[in-house]
Image (cartoon, rainbow, N blue to C red):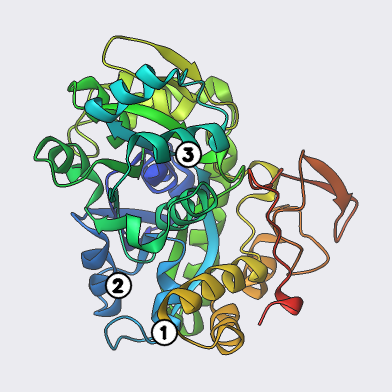
């Protein structure tokens, strides 16, 4: 049977693995698809190519469709996030100068305590801290703003600078940023080049930060439902394969190839295993649960997460949060997830919204059929979010 080719855009990061591994390991072909993978340089390019129909679907920062839904991007057709491709995978890096000041203060770089790390950073940076994030609407920006806001940084002492992920190390070397939050392998790349030290993994701030989603134009999902379902099932099965620790070495080797990340496989493997070198001197730290592709129902696109992103974006921009949430939630397509992944055996929660940040540990809960495990999703400071109470 001839395969249907879908043109998929991605930015070179380890969390593009579902697309790359899905093609390389045959999960796409099992669904009758061939992925034509298009490597892109920046998130705005990814958005614009999807909007113009130059790619059929995109590996995209989870909050980007929310920015579009709120009318904060260019005038493009509606985007929908139909499933998450990953949770976690981000790391926060600081310049070597700041790292030295932190050590002089007695900070131990334990890679776990977000509160002590943030408060120490506040002490050693008395003025403005410039932090690189990959895009205006990104989980990295959400992590940095939440974490540093809770640790004593005010709006006038925190400057967020947009930098494409592969350019983070270069921006720090040029003195354009003092710190950055980025998906792997680009934080480890900066450490390897002797430019930065890692301070925290993203999961130390929010234990299940939704990072990338599979995003399509709404007119594609409506006019090509068979291909939409096949694509979702192929990526869902790839995510299950990637979550097996025994497969991550193979995944690192494939991702590191010249046509994909074009980096030593060791760098890709650090991010996939959560065993990270935090300083150029070779200090190692482990971050349990550093990245998940499907485990703990992490691929389910909770509408409450759409509401949380929308509320945060609205508050920063002086937009009515209640209106923003109502505009955003229809773009996280729990209905398509249920329709297309039920037949694949995906565990499906009974509701499409929940109290975000409430789980301090993994929890078994009722599902449409039987039970399912939800991944812990707590914030370091105990923050929780209930959409119905937030406006």
- Where 160 falls versus 244 (above or below)? below
Nearest to N terminus: mark 3 or mark 1: 1
Q: Nearer the viewer, mark 3 or mark 1?
A: 3
Label 3 sits on a secondary structure element that is helix
Which residue is rendered at x = 57% and y = 71% of the image?
A: 306
The x and y percentages for residue 338 are 70, 67
**Crowding at label 1, few (<14), some or many (≥20) Cα neighbours within 10 Å?**
some
- Residue placed under numbered mark 2 in the picture: 50
Q: CA distance from mark 2 to mark 3?
A: 37 Å
Q: Mark 2: give few (<14), some (14-19) or many (20+) Cα within 10 Å.
A: many
Q: Which one is nearer the viewer's eye here, 204 or 224?
A: 204
**Disc 3 to disc 1, C-alpha distance:** 38 Å
Q: Residue at x 48, y 33 (%)?
A: 117
Q: Which quadrant of the view contains residue 99?
A: top left
Q: Earlier in the sequence, mark 2 or mark 1?
A: 2
Q: Going 29% across and 21% down the picture, which residue do you hit?
A: 100
Q: Does residue 285 sit above or below 334 in this rendering? A: above
The C terminus lies in quadrant: bottom right
């Amino acid at each position: 049977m001839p395969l249907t080719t879908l043109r998929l855009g991605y930015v070179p990061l380890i969390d593009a693995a579902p697309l790359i591994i899905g093609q390389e390991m045959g999960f796409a072909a099992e669904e009758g698809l061939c992925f034509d993978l298009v490597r892109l340089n920046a998130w705005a390019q990814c958005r614009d190519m999807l909007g113009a129909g130059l790619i059929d679907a995109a590996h995209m920062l989870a909050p980007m469709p929310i920015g579009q839904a709120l009318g904060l991007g260019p005038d493009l057709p509606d985007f929908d996030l139909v499933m998450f491709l990953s949770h976690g995978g981000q790391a926060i890096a600081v310049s070597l100068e700041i790292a030295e000041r932190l050590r002089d203060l007695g900070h131990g770089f334990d890679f776990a305590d977000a509160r002590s790390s943030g408060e120490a950073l506040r002490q050693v940076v008395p003025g403005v801290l410039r932090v690189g994030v990959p895009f205006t609407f990104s989980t990295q920006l959400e992590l940095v703003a939440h974490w540093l806001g809770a640790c004593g940084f005010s709006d006038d002492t925190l400057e967020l600078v947009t930098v494409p992920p592969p350019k983070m190390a270069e921006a720090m070397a040029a003195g354009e940023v003092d710190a950055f939050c980025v998906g792997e392998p680009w934080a480890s790349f900066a450490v390897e080049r002797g430019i930065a030290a890692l301070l925290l993994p993203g999961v130390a701030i929010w234990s299940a930060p939704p990072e990338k989603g599979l995003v399509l134009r709404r007119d594609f999902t409506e006019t090509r439902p068979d291909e939409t379902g096949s694509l979702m099932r192929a990526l869902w099965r790839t995510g299950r394969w990637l979550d097996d620790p025994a497969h991550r070495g193979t995944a690192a080797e494939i991702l590191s190839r010249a046509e994909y990340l074009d980096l030593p496989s060791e760098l890709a493997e650090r991010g996939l295993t959560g065993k990270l070198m935090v300083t150029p001197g070779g200090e190692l730290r482990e971050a349990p649960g550093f990245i998940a592709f499907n485990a703990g129902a992490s691929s389910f696109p909770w509408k409450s997460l759409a509401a949380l992103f929308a509320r945060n974006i609205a508050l920063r921009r002086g937009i009515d949060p209640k209106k923003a949430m109502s505009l955003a939630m229809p773009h996280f397509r729990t209905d398509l997830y249920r329709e297309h992944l039920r037949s694949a055996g995906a565990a499906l929660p009974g509701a499409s919204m929940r109290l975000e940040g409430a789980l301090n540990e993994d929890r078994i809960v009722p599902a449409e059929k039987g039970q399912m495990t939800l991944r812990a999703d707590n914030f370091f400071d105990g923050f929780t979010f209930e959409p119905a109470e937030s406006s």
